[in-house]
Image (spheres, coloured by chain):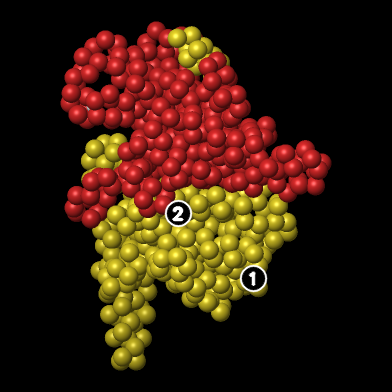
Chain colours: A red, B yellow
Amino acid sequence: MAWFRKKSKFTTIGNTNKKKDLPEGIWRLCDSCEEYITNDEIKRNYHICPRCNYYYVLPVEERIKHTLDEGSFEEFDANLASKNPLDFDGYDQKIRSAQQKTGRYEGIVTGRGEIEGYPVIFGVLDFAFMGGSMGSVVGEKVTRAAERALNDELPLFIVSTGGGGARMHEGMLSLMQMAKTSAAIALLKKHGIPFLSLIAHPTMGGVAASFAALGDVILAEPRALIGFAGPRVIEQTIGQQLPPGFQRSEFLLEKGMIDIIVERPNIRNVIKPLLEHMWYNRYALRAQQRQGNKTAVYAVKGA
Amino acid sequence: MRYLEFEKPLREIESKIEQLEVYAYSRDIDLSGEIQPLKEKLSSLLDEIFTHLTPWQRVQLARHPDRPYCLDYLQYIADDFIELHGDRTFRDDQAIIAGFCRIGNYSVAIIGHQKGKDTDENIRRNFGMPHPEGFRKARRIMETAARFHIPIITFIDSPGAFPGIQAEERGQHEAIAKNLEIMSQLGVPIICIVTGEGGSGGALAIGVGNRVLILENGYYAVCTPEACAAIILRDRTKAASISGSMRIVSSDLKNLGLVDEIIPEPLGGAHRNPEETAQNVKNAIIRHLDDLSILSPDELIADRYKRFRDMGVFYEAQSVGISIANETTGQ
Ligand SMILES: [Zn+2]
């Protein structure tokens, strides 16, 4: 903690040092089609290449902007920060540079917001913060978000970009976050609170193999890499190249592992009716209003 | 018996003792005068080698080819074991075994990784690395056990979930996640014992217990030391040197509050006396079952939730940092 206390005079964390992911107005080559595009064009197009439809990682602030009603987001637990519980060599510096790069204490933002006026508990992993990996803080914030959803009887909606999986630098404490977050989701299921999981590129390992895979409905962005073992590890194991499209959303849809692929600009149009069908427009609620609590079996905890 | 590199000093002296014993037996003569000093020498050599093991040596012991596996333990401590097979959807994955048996006075469900004793068996059991259907078989039996109020004992010993094309196709990540979810809500006592390798998600997928115990020379890690070295140091061969900083051996895990108890092994490791090791395991199982059996199903679920809920190390910073809400709406 000591290192942070000393530095914690920087309430400006991020404001001054923060690098814009994509500086505006500069020509560049698309990572995928290698055509000339401007960062401005990409940014205006939900961080999707207007030439080849390649999905860049959507920065957290823009994810919030594109998903939630303007001005509706209220953040929780923004000040939870990691220690270096194993004294793992280089971890302090890694955290510090990720904090400076993202302007955030940790790799996830959680809070309460609204989608077309419907309140939800919302969370989004930050790929820019150590690859969206899950250490103690990410696990704790996902768990708190789920517990908040249970407590406030609101649907939970989490966007995962967890390419880093369980964060190695916190060792077994990271692995245990898989059990902790999954147990919290299990509580939501037990009490009938919906959990929508949107998986974006890339989401692997400990994040894919815990809460992200446990949505009542699992949505994915097009061509997102989703799986347990990384493609390179598998290639080493089997000693051959993987088929094209392996572990991509379309492949997972075909194999029955996800419910629906949603184009980024369309997400609110899919989430809104899901929230209505699963929560805000339920027969059970209306029936409950008609018949008092006779239909409590359909209804939420404590209703 | 097979010898690890650091065990090799034992080989010469042990084979000498064996020769003398065979000779004495076959000729019916007393050679205890010759054998006794050798045994004393062996004992001090064991002390020397095994009282200050490095983390990497413990990892190697956890992977020792002669280490007892789940079925070995059952042979020593379980009665009336009935193995049950299959996930009812795809196939029977023999990297995980499941079934019912009696330990002491308790009928219990057993779930365990199972490695092979030789190459043929290792191929059949995929070196103890499950595919999704293995985890799903485990889940099926655990859910069945919970329906009939049967406590669950899991034996963890796997390098990890198998990283292969078919495993991914059939949803390795989903199978693991689902087990974590389901295990957290089972209303029976669950005791998990890391007997050898606790390999990442493949271990945790049968590791959500009210009690998590580990044998003295077991290890439990977020990934193998080889994988950690490959990613952090970009060099797989530095596994030995990074294994210490990963904090994966039994004493580290106990200090971090991630395991509840270390089950002692005989000097030299479990493979030097599987029967004694199994007795220690049995005693621990019965002691914890006695403790847990006074809890109601809801209390067991709450106890397990709290156990994992409390895991994690973090702090609350004084400043909240930037306000995301202002940033997004301000543009
Ligand atoms: Zn392009």
| Residue A124 percent location from the top left of the image | 47, 29
Q: Of the residues shown, which amino acid type is indicated by label 1?
A: Tyr
The quarter of the rendering in which ligand 1 is drawn is: top left
In the rendered structure, the answer to whether residue A226 lies left or right of residue A244 reads: right
Indicate yes or no: mark 1 CB to ligand 1 under 8 Å: no
Which residue matches tag 1?
B106
Residue B265 percent coordinates (x, y): 47, 61
Q: Alpha carbon of mark 1 to alpha carbon of mark 2: how far?
A: 29 Å
Which of the two discs, 1 and 2, labels the residue nearer the N terminus?
Answer: 1
Q: Which residue is rendered at x = 53% and y = 17% of the image?
A: A70
Check if mark 1's residue and mark 2's residue have beta carbons within 8 Å. Answer: no
Label 1 resides on the chain identified as B
> Which residue is nearer to you in this view: A172 or A212?
A212
The residue sitting at 72% across, 39% down in the picture is: A286
Farthest right residue? A292
Residue at the disc numbered 2 = B175
> Seen in the image, is A28 located left or right of residue A108?
left
